[in-house]
Image (cartoon, rainbow, N blue to C red):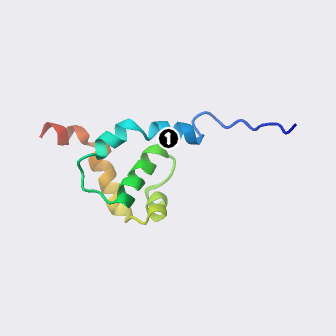
Amino acid sequence: MTPQLALPVGHDAATRRERASAEPMAVLRGHDLTVAERSALLDCYATPDRTFLEIASTHGVDRERLQELWFDLFLQPSKQRTV
């Protein structure tokens, strides 16, 4: 019988999928985003250990655009909701 390897907590696909579920989807609703931009933003949310450049190149999105979207939608959302 082959011994099974244990993955560190938080590094499996199920955990990433759970983190990339309801909250970011609610933030992305109502914004005019391409499929690639939406996918890249979810990837940023689910894998915070990767760089913007790495994620942008994976999804074919401009790094600067991805970074601007990230800061506008996830880091300063309270300003958008109160205005």
The C terminus: image quadrant: top left
Q: Is residue 19 left or right of residue 30?
A: right
Q: Is residue 5 left or right of residue 48?
A: right
Q: Nearer the viewer, residue 46 or 67?
A: 46
Residue under the image location 34 percent in, 62 percent down:
64
Q: Is residue 27 left or right of residue 44?
A: left
Q: Quarter of the image holding residue 76? A: top left
Residue under the image location 71 percent in, 35 percent down:
6
The N terminus: image quadrant: top right
Res. 75 visible in picture: no
**Hey, what amino acid is under mark 1?**
Arg
Residue under the image location 51 percent in, 47 percent down:
49
Q: Residue pushed farthest top?
A: 9
Percent position of residue 40, x then y: 41, 55
Q: Quarter of the image holding residue 4? A: top right
Res. 37 visible in picture: yes
Numbered disc total: 1
Residue under the image location 31 percent in, 49 percent down:
71
The crowding category of the residue bearing disc 1, from other C-alpha atoms within 10 Å (few below 14, some 14 to 19, many at least 20), is: few
Q: Is residue 43 left or right of residue 79?
A: right
Q: Residue pushed farthest left?
A: 83
Percent position of residue 54, x then y: 49, 60
Q: Quarter of the image holding residue 36? A: bottom left
Q: Which residue is mark 1?
A: 17
Does dot 1 land on a helix, a strand or a loop? helix
